[in-house]
Amino acid sequence: MNPFETRQGGVVLTDSGADFAVGSHHAERIELCLFDASGRAEVARLPMERDCDHVHRLHVDGIVQGARYGFRAHGRYAPDHGYWFDPSKLLVDPYATEIDRPFAHDPRLSVFGSDTAALVPKTIVTNHPLAKPMRPLLPKGGFIYELAVKTFTMRHPEVPPEQRGTVAALAHPAIIAHLKKLGVNAIELMPIVAWIDERHLPPIGLTNLWGYNPIALMALDPRIVPGGMRELRETVQTLHDAGIGVLLDLVFNHTGESDKLGTTLSLRGLDNLSCYRHLSDNPGVLVNDTGCGNTLACDHPYVRHLIIDSLRHFVIHAGVDGFRFDLAPILGRTTQGFHTTSRTLHAILVDEVLEDRVMIAEPWDIGPGGYQLGNFPAPFLEWNDRARDDIRRYWRGDSHMAGNLATALAGSSEIFTRHKENETRSVNFVAAHDGFTLFDLVSHSHKRNGRNGEHNRDGHDENYSWNNGVEGQPDNVTVLADRHRDVTALLATLFATRGTIMLTAGDEFGRTQHGNNNAYCQDNELTWLDWEAADQALIAHVSRLSQLRKRFSVFGETHFFANGGEVEWLSPGGTPMSVSDWEDGEALGLAMVLQTIDYELKTKLRLAVLFNRSHVELDFRLPQVKNRHWHHLPDEQHVEKVRLGGRSVAFYIEQ
């Protein structure tokens, strides 16, 4: 049997031409449209044949690599009943791996009967070589560095102008040197697959920067990856050679076809009823568990195969180490709600190509029962917003936060033991792409999103942030120093947590978005990193923290602390934290004393991490053992008495 016959879609080159396939249960018929080398002139329109699995197939002689094509689907047009068939709409192959131009919003994409062949990217017939196989480079307790390709590289002075804003720039020696200096284990690329702007952005002169609005789930966006899969594959290999893994942030929860007023570009025109979720008693109404206008029906066999095949494609042909899934509960949803044992989640974990890849869930969506932190099947890692908020609230000065901080530092066992697990799957972070930057977190009590054109209604209202006495940009050097001190403490807290940690690119710079906590549409100098203005002292601080984290075994372990001395929680006075200490709403200091192996000294010892959230110095008493003394890190200075400055974190080892 030809293996292509088992595929749900795509194109496979043969000795005589190419086999094309596209799935659709509800279309009456589908036509393959071939275009000239420019992608402008349609040169043939050929009927396809439906098989028993509702996959429409056709072999065409003479097709070679580089040919351009699309589809037209015929059938009923009745949106109120879920049917969107309109043969005037050229449709992008859901299995497209390369397209000849970016998507661009145009009102005609939403108008029935308006031909869109001139507007829609054409799929390019491509035969991809295999990537060099390699085990993922992210270890337990590893350090992930989240970045948007354009934001990260657009203003780098050493990257050639023609490479700025592209994936190829990530392979530049200056970029790799920065990642190595920070001690990054893996970079996590915000979406690089082909997306379209939300329809409200072009009229107000804005564009989508983040890419969380995909159309083609496998095709790389030509604006970010102009060299296609070759560029991604070569960049991944260069990063791997430097010991740095690559994770892709993918969106399988919705597409940019949006709501009922949205575009018809691919899945909607091919089989809306199968590919998107609708109200069970009203198929004309799209379910909106994503807040983006539609929700992919990830439990439908066609969509499930599309997701698995997309993931396999990026592993086989680019060699990526793993994936982060945006609004991941959608992957586990059926008509009855989220299920941790859903067939789609299970299929991801047992696939022979994917079974050893890193999988990270953003464990929430806005649908019923959408908050699922701790409920994804192992070995999924999960973004931990609970730890994020508790770390923020502790340093903001909220009452009764000592216990919450300790829980976050220890890997959030109350979350990740629900299903009788014995190790944390937490991805700890203090700031991410979505929300305030780390520096804005300590500079703004309120968001300032007016530039987004939505009258400051977008973005989260509660950020657990503070401004150190002045909202926004201050003239007072004391306020700036206080903010720098707070950022330093937040970073040290993050690097002291148990589990995987994540830092967003530029937060080690002291970057600001001037209070914009939803900068998805700010493709400009508000978000582009200013490398020449980077805070070198802060970068050095992150580098030291990363070195410390790698030095001690305790940060590379993910099992939960056992009773018996692996960790001691002490008050500043040196006594074990009592119930009254934990319940003290205004507790100002906390000591975490850990048993660990010091890889540098090649010995087992105690490591103390001290936290002082007050604004004044605080004395700490550390446990004493005869003939052993405490030494401050990283300078190894011997100390008889520990006096910790206000708003700070310090590390000590006992020798």
Image (spheres, rainbow, N blue to C red):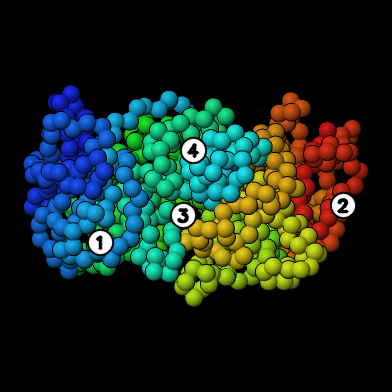
Task: Look at the image and tell me in which quarter the C terminus lies.
Answer: top right
The answer for how far apart the CA atoms under marks 2 and 3 are is 44 Å
Which residue has dot 4 on it?
Answer: 168
Farthest residue, direction bottom: 455
The answer for how far apart the CA atoms under marks 1 and 3 are is 22 Å
The secondary element bearing badge 2 is classed as: strand
Pick the residue in front: 145 or 338: 145
Q: Residues within 10 Å of mark 4 (few under 14, many from 20)?
A: many
Which residue has dot 2 on it?
Answer: 643
Three-letter code, disc 1: Leu
The answer for how far apart the CA atoms under marks 2 and 4 are is 48 Å
Query: Please, is residue 290 above or below residue 380 in the view?
Result: below
Task: Look at the image and tell me in which quarter the N terminus lies.
Answer: top left
The secondary element bearing badge 3 is classed as: loop
Q: Residue at x 61, y 54 (%)?
A: 430
In this view, the mark in front (1 or 2):
1
Three-letter code, disc 2: Arg
Three-letter code, disc 3: Trp
Picture disc at residue 210: 3
Picture disc at residue 109: 1
Q: Are marks 1 and 2 in contact (CB under 8 Å)?
A: no
Residue 620 in view, yes or no: yes
The secondary element bearing badge 1 is classed as: helix
x, y percentage for residue 73?
Answer: 14, 52
Query: Please, is residue 426 above or below residue 614 in the view?
Result: above
Q: Residue at x 81, y 54 (%)?
A: 572
In this view, the mark in front (2 or 3):
3
Q: Residue at x 57, y 29 (%)?
A: 242
Please tell me in which quadrant of the rendered image residue 449 appears: bottom right
